[in-house]
Image (spheres, helix red, strand yellow):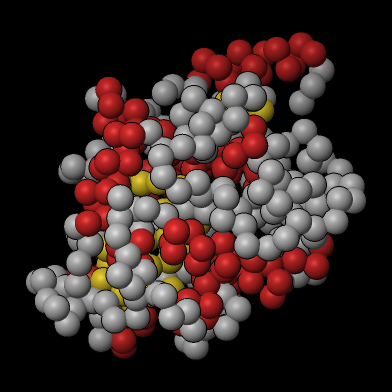
Amino acid sequence: MSRTPLVLFLATVLAGCGGGSGNNPASNNTTPPGTTTSTPSGTSGMVALNDLGNGTYLGFSGGLYPSGSNTMPAQHHTAGLAHATAIHPVDINGNASPSGKYILLSIGMSNTTQEFCSVPATLPCNSWTFMGQAATDGTVNHTSLVLVNGAEGGKAASFWTSPTLADYDRIRDTVLTPQGLSEKQVQIVWLKVANPNPTTSLPAANADAFTLEMQEGQIARALKTRYPNLQQIFVSSRIYAGYAASTLNPEPYAYQSGFSAKWLIQAQINQIAGGTIDAQAGDLNYNTIAPWIAWGPYLWANGTTARSDGLTWVQTDFQSDGTHPSQSGQTKVGGMLLNFFKTSPLTQCWFVVGGVCS
């Protein structure tokens, strides 16, 4: 899945032209379409990956999965099912126990913690976030499943790339242990990471999107080392950033982070199918060194231009910096996460009371 030749070719062309199976993770929008006013400038050429399909962006194909599709390939779905059914309650030593627990853990930065639980990344979670909404939903398994927020403000992708980094200790010592939980009980991760102040856009060979893909591969391996019973990682890329008032993570980088996630997942699919390790993402063999990886909810839509499933992002969905979600934005992502885990055929067996994976 080498993309370097294509990148170099596109860079040359653009310079010469003077131009710069299962559950669909993009169909879980639980909010109605917003107004259809004009989208802020600078993002008019961007199409959400789930709507881009066989089309291209700067020469890179769309779709959440290979070949412009939003449907997970059958082989990857079958593997995901095996990993889903392997999730089971264990005690703090990792031994199977009817009274044990399994953990869905969030990993990421400020947006991640704000959407998953709360701004300060501490309990209690805000009622409108994912954990807050799940806590009052009677269909969610509250007996064996424990939702744990490991994300924290300022923790960019580089904070998670090695299993020896301090934030893994922070999660163990200040999040898991005080709740009577252990690292051996972590079996599912929601991963949403980014890097601050990106400067190099696709299609450049040194684009930030390629760096993020590489880091996400490193994170997947670090997570499996740190959490030996980890079975599944669900990845989401950033929400819209066309209202951003700073260089923290504006467009087109928020949009392009979707390609990082797409390429990460595709690298694992291709490696298992053909045996070739992707040069950017690294070894992602889910039989040895990494968990099984797939899309969680795909969160990006082009501002007020409604996606095919109706998702929009209006300015009031953001705080004053135009980057971090406001309460309404946190509610939107929280709802998409909840709906995803409740409806995905690869999560229902461990997330929903009486649920079955298929």
Q: Is residue 96 above or below residue 287?
A: below
Query: Residue 332, located in which quarter of the rendered image?
Result: bottom right
Q: Position of residue 41 (x, y in %)?
A: 86, 43
Q: Is residue 18 above or below residue 303?
A: above
Query: Which quarter of the figure is the N terminus placed in?
Result: top left
Q: In this view, does 265 lie above or below 122?
A: above
Counting every numbered tag in the picture gives 0
Q: Residue at x 57, y 43 (%)?
A: 258
In this view, the residue in front, 205 or 44, is 44
In this view, the residue in front, 2 or 306, is 306
Q: Which residue is drawn at 33% across and 34% down?
A: 74
For residue 331, say whether it is visible.
yes
Q: Where is residue 161 in the image (x, y as percent from the top left)?
A: 38, 52
Q: Residue at x 85, y 56 (%)?
A: 35
Q: Does 138 sit left or right of 110 as displayed?
A: left
Q: Where is residue 183 in the image (x, y as percent from the top left)?
A: 24, 70
Query: Residue 326, located in which quarter of the rendered image?
Result: bottom right
For residue 166, say whether it is visible.
no
In this view, the residue in front, 116 or 352, is 352
